[in-house]
Amino acid sequence: MSVKQERRDFIGLAFGAVAAVGGALSLVAVKKTWDPLPSVKAGATSSFDLSPMQDGEMRQVVWRKQPIFILKKDPSMPPNDKRDVVVGDARFMIAIGLCTHLGCIPQWQPNKQIFFCACHAGEFNADGVNTFGPPSRPLDIPPFKIEGMKLVLGETSPEYEKLVNKA
């Protein structure tokens, strides 16, 4: 009788061990599905060198599949302490390049110094502030950090927090 009892105990312990290992492996698999893909992690931040930009030059870069406007202001453009990013002695306007009305991409018109959204004739000045048309608020400011003359998109910094609180 004791031999049967020992065999039954062994079978129960073996089944319990297999179930525990299977449960642990399924938890590992679930955790891996929750982790972001390497391509997503790589696209989380992007850096851009601001030093080669000329006064009045506007660049459109892509971050997280969104257009980002970087405008180096020239002396004829009025400073705006609420929205300008100051790097050294240069001023930049950095904004997500999507109209705050319906998400169209405004075009920079350097002769008028405005961003013009052709969808519904919305206009934003060189600071990204809405001046005409249906957009109800200025262009959004993406999270950024300044490292020397490099702009790092996707990370927050005191400069970013200051602009978001003022704007």
Image (tube, helix red, strand yellow):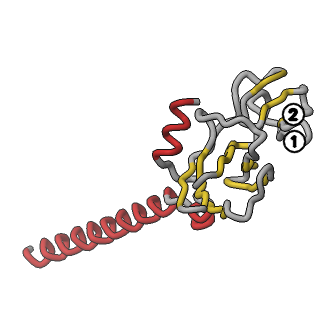
Q: Residue at x 51, y 31 (%)?
A: 165
Q: Residue at x 73, y 50 (%)?
A: 72
* Residue 156 versus residue 32 in the image, above or below: above
Q: Give the image quarter of residue 118.
A: top right
Quick one: quadrant of the C terminus?
top right
* Amino acid type shown at disc 1: Gln
* Residue 62 versus residue 159 in the image, above or below: below
Q: Which residue is mark 2?
A: 117
Q: Is residue 152 visible?
A: yes
Disc 1 packing (10 Å; few <14; some 14–19; many ≥20): some
Q: Position of residue 8 (x, y in %)?
A: 19, 71
Q: Residue at x 13, y 71 (%)?
A: 5
Q: Give the image quarter of residue 63.
A: bottom right
Disc 2 packing (10 Å; few <14; some 14–19; many ≥20): many
Q: Which residue is mark 1?
A: 107
Disc 2, SS? strand
* Residue 72 versus residue 41 in the image, above or below: above
